[in-house]
Image: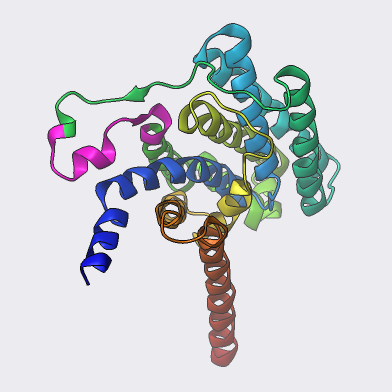
Amino acid sequence: MDDFGLLFNTVFSTGLFNEMLRRATPVAIAAIGGALTQHAGIMNIGMDGMILMGAFFGVLGSSIFGSTWAGLGLAILVGVLVGLFFGLFVVKFKSDEFIIGTALNTFAVGLTSFLSRSIFGTQGAKGYPSLPNISIPGFDKVPVLGPILNGHSLFVYLTWLLVLGFFFYIYRTPQGFWLRAAGEKPETLRTAGISPDKMKWTASILCGVLCCIAGAHLSLGYLNGTFAEKMSNSRGYIAFACVIFAASNPAKAYLAALMFGFFDAIGLRLQAYISSDLTSIIPYAITIIMMTYVVVNTRRKREKIHRKV
């Protein structure tokens, strides 16, 4: 019993929730972008490749210019280009978004691996200028909340503003209404004199930018100026699962990302007691459960509708 209590106190500590926020942030930022494209009627599974490119070019810009902010700026620029690339095929040429997203993920792995080996060598990039951690004076002395909320990278805190801002944009502004109409009632929107394709382009570009920011946070913030091949580690797919689970609601998607971060952090701490091969599958198993819940819940709703009819 004492051993169990020690294990419980070791795993479920303030450090666990501090790590939860750090691990949830890149997934949450990407999920916000995925929510935008989902509302616009685009299923974007290419977010993992977007995150990976943001992570690489963030470090590349940081190494070239010796500035974290230059790296972040380069990542955002790449995000715009990737969003335009995705929109070109999906919106302009009406290609299948599933195929384009898969191709984008594959292309991102090959491109970043080739450039990383060519520029940084086989060991990858490490120790380049990174995003500073923010410590609020005196806040670390606040019981429980202080150790959990203090000392994070900038984007951990900006994510909260992004969630609130895009929630307001989607559900409280005319542009957000047009965005949702572009996915749900494009003909009605076109009748009102507003181009659905324009809203789809906007969603694609914003998604590219947000995913690349998520990647930049991953390499420049979470891993302190480090890039390794395939370091996105399927976070784009996790973000997509969060979007589906949350019905494209940014606030709910953030909560879903926190759940992923929570179990990911638990898996990391349990590695001291259980094989890492086993603990590493915990967050992905939770993701499968999330998607199963969505499928079962959707089927139940459809059955209720059919019964009423």
Q: In the rendering, at what x and y percent does residue 38 appear?
A: 62, 52
Q: Quadrant of the N terminus?
A: bottom left
Of residue 8 and residue 227, the one placed in the foreground of this image is 8
Residue 78: quadrant of the picture: top right
From the viewer's side, name the closer residue of 156 and 122. 122
Residue 112 horizontal side relative to residue 184, left or right: right
Measured as percent of width and height from the top left, residue 200 is found at: 68, 42
Image coordinates for residue 149, horizontal then vertical, percent: 27, 38
Q: How is the image coloured?
A: rainbow
Q: Position of residue 53 (x, y in %)?
A: 68, 31
> Looking at the image, is 298 positioned above or below residue 125?
below
Q: Is residue 292 above or below residue 137?
A: below
Seen from the viewer's position, the closer of residues 48 and 64 is 64
**Magenta region: which residues?**
141-157
Snapshot quadrant of residue 118: top right
Question: Which residue is depicted at the point 27% across and 62% down?
Answer: 8
Picture quarter with the C terminus: bottom right
Q: Residue at x 55, y 55 (%)?
A: 243
